[in-house]
Amino acid sequence: MKIAKDEKGREFEVTDRQTGEKKFAVSLFLKAKVRGEKGEEVRFTLDADPGEGFEEGMVVELIAPRMSPYSFKNKDGETVSGVAFAAVGLKSVASF
């Protein structure tokens, strides 16, 4: 499940604002296609529970992946910008 914190530091489950359905989070290691270059760990928000059976080292495919840029001012007036990654779900492809 995807967990976030409010302004007072209290944790809560993240849900879809329109449907109320729970969101899930997964960290994936994206391998570089160029030899000698390192990959990168990226967190994705999933719209659906990925289910059981996903283990470290598995190759997975993201179902309907998307990325969304964001920018907002924090409580200190600083602009925070970045990119959020999300997908409908995951499916297993293979293991290595």
Image (cartoon, helix red, strand yellow):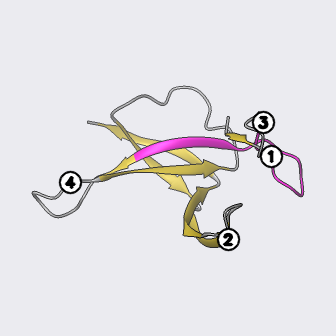
The type of residue carrying mark 4 is Lys
Secondary structure at badge 1 equals loop
Q: Is residue 50 above or below residue 77?
A: above
Task: Give yes or no for contact between labels 4 and 3 (Cβ–Cβ under 8 Å).
Answer: no
Q: Residue, x 67% and y 71% (percent of image)?
A: 72
Q: Position of residue 2 (x, y in %)?
A: 67, 39
Q: Position of residue 31 (x, y in %)?
A: 28, 53
* Residue range of the region highlighted in magenta in the rendering: 11-28
Q: Which residue is mark 2?
A: 72
Badge 2: how crowded within 10 Å, few (<14), some, or many (20+)? few
Distance (Cα) linking label 1 and label 2: 20 Å
Q: Earlier in the sequence, mark 3 or mark 2?
A: 3
The type of residue carrying mark 3 is Phe
Secondary structure at badge 2 equals strand
The type of residue carrying mark 2 is Phe
Secondary structure at badge 4 equals loop
Q: Which residue is mark 3?
A: 12
The type of residue carrying mark 1 is Thr
Q: Which residue is mark 4?
A: 38
Badge 1: how crowded within 10 Å, few (<14), some, or many (20+)? some
Quadrant into which the N terminus falls: top right
Q: Residue, x 80% and y 46% (percent of image)?
A: 15
